[in-house]
């Protein structure tokens, strides 16, 4: 069973902070973007004052399929969403441990679910490395074969008329350097 927590970090004392004594402890109070903050003040060995504050996002601590304890940022500010991510990671670790999932396949699936830009860059580099082309001149051109169901934005070197029509039918856009974008 994993756990969620917010990391504490030390930051320089804000310039607008007011120091207050309470129950024998020194606290700093300040406002940032209209929100009031209060945090304990610590003095470093060199005499600089810092405040100890919690990060805005949750961190998860759980055991992997190999039995190692891992701390991983969820990237979530909401505890409910962070708990869902933690549960997903624990489930994946259990499935890998049970042999239902393969760790390499899971990494491949995660990479495939990411943005398309890095995949296109890797593809063009692979073409050059394989000797299919000597160098990448104009980047990637999208051709109009197949069907598109998702609304996507493409930033490419070119697109055929049929590809552009299919992308725009799905609600997406195509950005080509040098082309003027018509006002909507």
Image (tube, grey):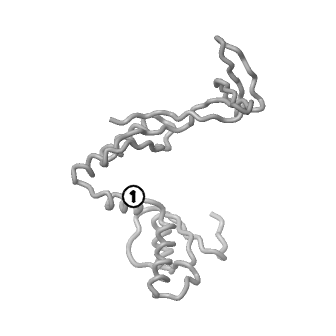
Image quadrant in which the N terminus is located:
top left
Please give the name of the residue rendered at 74% of the width and 27% of the height, measured from the top-left corner. Answer: 17
Q: Is residue 47 left or right of residue 176?
A: right
x, y percent for residue 45: 70, 31
Query: In terms of secondary structure, where does tag 1 sit?
Result: helix
For residue 59, above or below residue 125: above
Viewer-proximal residue among 167 and 36: 36
For residue 122, above or below residue 17: below
x, y percent for residue 173: 54, 67
> Neighbour class for label 1 at 10 Å: few (<14), some, many (≥20)?
few
For residue 91, above or below residue 48: below
Q: Is residue 132 left or right of residue 27?
A: left
Q: Is residue 184 left or right of residue 88?
A: right
Read off the residue under disc 1. 110
The quarter of the picture where residue 30 lies is top right
Viewer-proximal residue among 184 and 107: 107
Please give the name of the residue rendered at 74% of the width and 21% of the height, measured from the top-left corner. Answer: 19
Viewer-proximal residue among 157 and 62: 62
The residue positioned farthest toward the top in the image shown: 23
Please give the name of the residue rendered at 22% of the width and 54% of the height, measured from the top-left corner. Answer: 100
């Amino acid at each position: 069973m994993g756990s969620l927590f917010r990391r504490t970090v030390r930051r320089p004392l804000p310039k607008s902070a007011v120091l207050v004594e309470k129950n024998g402890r020194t606290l700093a109070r300040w406002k940032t973007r209209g929100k009031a903050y209060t945090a304990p003040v610590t003095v470093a060995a060199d005499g600089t004052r810092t405040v100890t504050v919690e990060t805005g996002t949750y961190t998860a601590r759980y055991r992997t399929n190999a039995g190692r304890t891992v701390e991983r940022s969820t990237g979530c500010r909401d505890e409910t969403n962070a708990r869902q991510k933690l549960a997903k990671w624990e489930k994946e670790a259990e499935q890998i441990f049970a042999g239902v999932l393969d760790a390499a396949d899971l990494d491949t699936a995660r990479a495939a679910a990411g943005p398309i830009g890095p995949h296109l860059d890797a593809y063009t580099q692979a073409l050059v490395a394989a000797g299919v082309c000597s160098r990448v001149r104009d980047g990637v051109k999208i051709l109009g074969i197949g069907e598109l169901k998702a609304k996507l934005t493409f930033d490419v070197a070119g697109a055929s008329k049929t590809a552009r029509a299919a992308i725009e039918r799905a609600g997406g856009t195509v950005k080509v350097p040098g082309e003027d974008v018509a006002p909507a």
